[in-house]
Image (cartoon, rainbow, N blue to C red):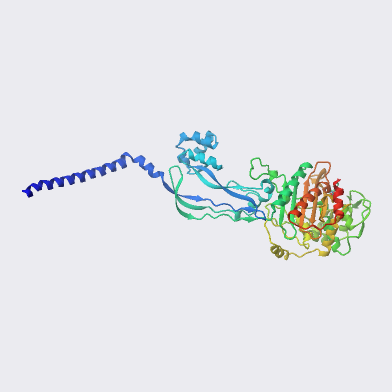
Amino acid sequence: MSESSSIPTYRGRRLLVLAVLSLAGLALVARAVDLQVVRKDFLQGQGDARYSRVVSEPAHRGMITDRLGEPLAISTPVDSVWANPQELILARDSWPQLSRVLGLKRGVLARQLAAKRDKEFMYLKRRVAPGLAQKVMALEVPGVALLPEYKRFYPAGEVTAHVVGFTNVDDEGQEGMELVYDARLKSIAGAKRVIKDRIGRVVENVERVSEPQPGEDIVLSIDRRLQYLAYRELKAAVKSHRADAGSVVILDVRTGEVLAMVNQPAYNPNNRSKLKSSHLRNRAVTDVFEPGSTIKPFTVAAALETGRFNSNTVVDVRPGYLKVGRKTIRDFRDYGVIDVSTILQKSSNVGASKLALSISPEHLWQVFASVGLGADSGSGFPGEPSGLLTDFGAWHDIQRATVSYGYGLSVTAMQLARAYAALASDGRPLPVSFLRRSEAQAAELASLYEPVLSENSLRKVRRMLERVVEEGGTGTRAAVPGYRIAGKTGTVKKSGAGGYVEDSYLALFAGLAPASDPRLAMVVIIDEPRGEEYYGGAVAAPVFSRVMAGALRMLDIPPDNVNPDASQRLAFLGGKQ
Ligand code: 59J
């Protein structure tokens, strides 16, 4: 009984199981229909909302520092706002808000989007302020995202503009050291696989595809303190003399390193929106000029080397002019019968010419060439001209004479500074360097040069150049209290298309300090001073004095003129009145 009655119970159970299974099957079918048919669009959207992508991971460009490690160019991380045009084009409702926040004109945005509608990437705004980046992301506009990048910043601004140069928006060097050492400074972006959400935000890092490689740091020879000082004094002088332009170069005579190089006019590399191309010019390296009287020490050195002249050899420069062929060489006034030392001290064109005419053209040329005149300074700057020193074979008497006092040849400020440095460093013109250089490296370089000038002649020339800065010399205003200065003034008529131009001058001063054992060579050029004063001794020498005084102090170079009655100090006080 119990058995027979149990049969239907089993059947019922079987039915129940069947029913449950069928229901489950039905539910699955329904679910499938729901997912694949009813909610298809929604789900597909969700699937697309998280996607994996390989994105580039920027690395920073190398830093440029001065010789003491002070930053002159650094890359700081910033965000750029970009969009996938294909997505943003569909989110038309968000355009007004987006363009308002980004500060873009609506029409411009629409036009840019239309132009890029086939692309998957476009910048909306590069290198934005952090606040703005957050505001944009808060809008949650589909297809708009941030891209980490780096922005170049120049802490010393216009003070180092011509040395350091700048990069373009793609971080490529355009000018100066940024251009010269671009390959070393350049970084290599890495790549990583990430998961991004619907609006392009990275929600997960998956894997590194390649490592980002930052660029190499570059240490310059520049001393930022000297650079600032030279900049300030040059700018003030160009302004007060209402000059067109100017340059200052300071070299370490032992190593050939450029410790400072400044030009006026300059520009702010951090804001180049109103940049004029004339301000871009690195005049100290790219502009050539006739060096005029600043070349006379090399003429005197050539004369001494013949053994036929000494500092006190007398030369008759009367009556203040000298006829050479059909031309007349003139002095500022008639200096009478003077010695070689006084030729430099008073800057006699006639005296220099007489020395030159009594030595062989080949020898004069050789001495000029041996100190690097008419040759590339080795600065490595793009666009450095080699200057001009024509071959002595083509020199007639008039060329022999005019070359001796600085006309008919042309140099850059950098080349002139290098030639003066050679007057101090055994007559060897080390190629100049904008990179820090050790004394050992410099010594190795020096061994490649055969000095043409003897130490004996060089010492005599330096001693004569001290007299230029002493009472009775043309350069008294270059004096630096506490130090002996060796230097030379120059006032050069500028030449134009039709010959030499009246009332258009370069005021120059080139010199060495401390004269007893020179460490620094410096050249100051003021281009077309328009005030009452225009002589090198009046316009350029005071700049030399102020910059050299500061440089010697900053570099802890001990004074070599401690006697308060020393002639240069008296000259300095006299020159100020
Ligand atoms: C000078 C020249 C031009 C080129 C002359 C400057 C010549 C010359 C043809 C007249 C001003 C001026 C090849 S002068 O530098 O002698 O620095 O303190 O430009 O002589 O022959 O009204 N410098 N300068 N000469 N040309 N050609 C002196 C001198 C120099 C001084 C002053 C006054 C010239 C002492 C220059 C200075 O040493």
Viewer-side residue, 500 vs 534: 534
How far across and how far down the image is residue 188, in percent? 54, 54
How far across and how far down the image is residue 264, in percent? 73, 45
Residue in the image at 73% along x and 66% along y = 447
Quarter holding residue 266: top right
How many numbered dots are placed on residues in this image?
0
Quarter holding residue 389: bottom right
Q: In this view, does 513 lie to the left or right of 223?
A: right
Residue 559 appears anywhere in the view: yes
Viewer-side residue, 121 vs 25: 25
Residue in the image at 83% along x and 64% along y = 456
452 in relation to 387, above or below: below
Q: In this view, does 288 lie to the left or right of 169?
A: right
Residue 360 appears anywhere in the view: no
How far across and how far down the image is residue 460, in percent? 85, 61
Q: Is residue 195 left or right of residue 342?
A: left
Residue in the image at 36% along x and 40% along y = 42
Quarter holding residue 496: top right
Which quadrant: the C terminus? top right
